[in-house]
Image (cartoon, rainbow, N blue to C red):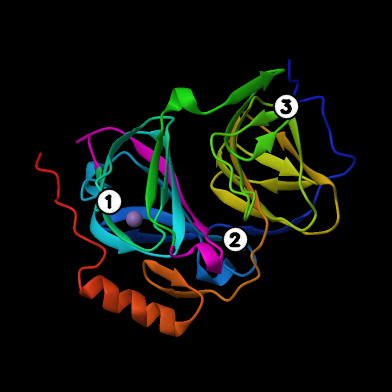
Amino acid sequence: MNDASTRSVTHSRAVERLVRGVQTSDGAGVRLTRVLGRELQRRLDPFLMLDAFRNDNPDDYIGGFPDHPHRGFETVTYMIAGRMRHNDSAGNEGLLESGGAQWMTAGSGLVHSELPEQVEGLMEGFQLWLNLPAQRKMTPPSYRDIPAGAIPEYAGAGVRVRVLAGESHGVAGAVARPDTEPLILDLHLPAGARFAQPLPAAHNAFAYTYRGSARIAGVEVPDRHMAILANDGAPGVEIEAGSDTRVLLVAGRPLGEPIAQHGPFVMNTADELRQAFADFQRGDFGRTVLRAS
Ligand code: MN
């Protein structure tokens, strides 16, 4: 039995800063919070973006994300509540449901749509963008649905840990990526519980509280705030829950390569961005057909 609450690291990484994110909208008018935006891409390399959405007004999500292209990185979508349909130009289709994830490698390029399959109720989740190293940016696109039941979990002392990627307390996650060794954990912590996770010193890391209130190295991380964890040589992070709390804990090995982004394309140079646009406009990414509903 893994007892997450009693395992500890000798001392925790400090909170370098708290980030609240920016209210914005994307796709066809989906209201969301951009927690990790461009100004943090260097600091949180290899992660390029984190959007959090939690809407119970259908007007704020019903338009979804119609056909749009991507090249050069991966998108990880994690659904807390709701249903979203995915279609892409590589011929993949999937239904993302509560507790499930979708791991899409855009690689050399695809066009996809992400559309809500509900007309009422709560839509809540995250989309995290993970960069690819230069030598893998033009890898063929691929797609994987990870239903809720296929995400490895462990529990101890009331703490429940869902391991989307990486490894935690001996439990291997649903996805592994040797280039950046991403760790993506969804932590469910009852009031007063503690959770400790070792982290390689060079890996960039952050924790996003999406319920309740967490405490890390003496700093309160309130609901809907991200704590950037300092690369201060500490052997890991220790998180304590102030109330019933849920936290997304994310870490990865930085690539240390140039980042050139224009909208949905993330490459290493401006020339590669121009090439991406030219290829897309020529139709090289293919086209998806919006699902008739
Ligand atoms: Mn997309």
Is residue 230 toward the left or the right of residue 186 in the image?
right
Q: Residue at x 42, y 32 (%)?
A: 100
- Image quarter (top left, top right, bottom left or bottom right) of the N terminus: top right
Q: Quadrant of residue 257?
A: bottom right
Name, please, the residue furthest toward the right. Answer: 10
Crowding at dot 3, Cα within 10 Å, few <14 / some 14-19 / many 20+, comes out as many
Residue range in magenta is: 116-138
- 172 and 123: which one is in front? 172
Q: Quadrant of residue 209?
A: top right
Q: Is residue 137 magenta?
A: yes
Image height of 78 relative to 32, above or below: above
- 143 and 190: which one is in front? 143
Residue pointed to by mark 1: 90
Mark 2 secondary-structure assignment: loop
Mark 3 secondary-structure assignment: loop
Name, please, the residue furthest toward the bottom. Answer: 271
- Image quarter (top left, top right, bottom left or bottom right) of the C terminus: top left
What is the distance, in whole Å, between disc 1 and disc 3 at their CAs? 44 Å
The label on residue 46 is 2
Three-letter code for the amino acid on which mark 1 is drawn: Ala
Three-letter code for the amino acid on which mark 3 is drawn: Ala
The image shows residue 59 at horizontal and vertical percentages of 22, 47
The label on residue 123 is none
Eye-nearest disc, 3 or 2 = 2
Crowding at dot 2, Cα within 10 Å, few <14 / some 14-19 / many 20+, comes out as many
Q: Quadrant of residue 120?
A: top left
Residue pointed to by mark 3: 193
Q: Residue at x 76, y 25 (%)?
A: 5
Is residue 269 toward the left or the right of residue 243 in the image?
left
Image height of 151 relative to 251, above or below: above
What is the distance, in whole Å, between disc 3 and disc 2 at their CAs? 30 Å
Image height of 5 relative to 236, above or below: above
